[in-house]
Image: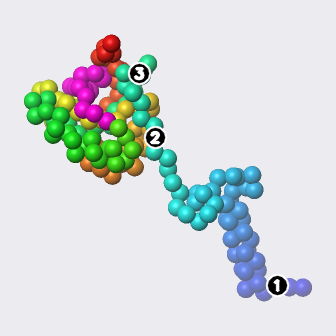
Amino acid sequence: MRQSPRTAAALVLAAAVTLGTAACTGSADDTTTPDGGDGSAPTIAWPTAIDPAAAGEAFWVVWTGIADTAEGPEKLQPNIDALAAAGYTTLPWDPACQSGAEERLGGLTGFADPLGVGVAFTSAEEAGMFDTLYEGDATIAVTEGTYTCTAAS
């Protein structure tokens, strides 16, 4: 039996669609679902902040607020409140407690003695995830370094 060109084209198109769909959807062993399986939008978990004083090695800080120390910590209260609304408890701290941060933030802001509000993370990926998810004030900088201040006794 001879197939018409139209029938042959339809069969080729059907095969291409079937193969394309199989390639895009993965195998039956693929257990990930981009929507959580319930039709909702995918959610990304907020990363867990760390205590920089307890970090044993390099850590990353997403700085969301910087003021001159002479202006006082009150100037940073809106940043603290915005971070609290996102689930992060923060206080102003001296960027000199992270190697290289004071110089970088001072250079960006022009403050000789900056005071900052930032959230510390164990990895650059977590800092980047936070920076992407956080809708508060704009990020001023993300710095990497080790903790340089002595712990209070």
Residue 75, image quadrant:
top left
Disc 3 vs disc 1: Cβ atoms closer than 8 Å? no
Which numbered disc flags the more N-terminal residue, 3 or 1? 1
Magenta stretch containing residue 57, yes or no? no
Q: Amino acid at mark 2?
A: Pro
Q: Residue at x 59, y 65 (%)?
A: 39
Residue 93 in the figure: left or right of residue 89: left
Residue 46 in the figure: left or right of residue 39: left
Q: Which residue is mark 3?
A: 54
Q: Residue at x 90, y 85 (%)?
A: 1
Q: Which residue is mark 1?
A: 3
The residue lying furthest to the front in this view is 153
- Return the x and y of residue 139 as percentages of the image width and height: 28, 43
Rendered view: 63 above or below 27: above
Q: Secondary structure at mark 3?
A: helix
Q: Amino acid at mark 3?
A: Ala
Q: Which residues are magenta?
A: 90-103
The answer to whether residue 21 is visible is yes
Q: Secondary structure at mark 1?
A: loop
The residue lying furthest to the left in this view is 70
Q: Amino acid at mark 1?
A: Gln
Mark count: 3
Label 1: few (<14), some (14–19) or many (≥20) C-alpha neighbours in 10 Å: few
Q: Which residue is mark 2?
A: 47
Magenta stretch containing residue 101, yes or no? yes
Disc 2 vs disc 3: Cβ atoms closer than 8 Å? no
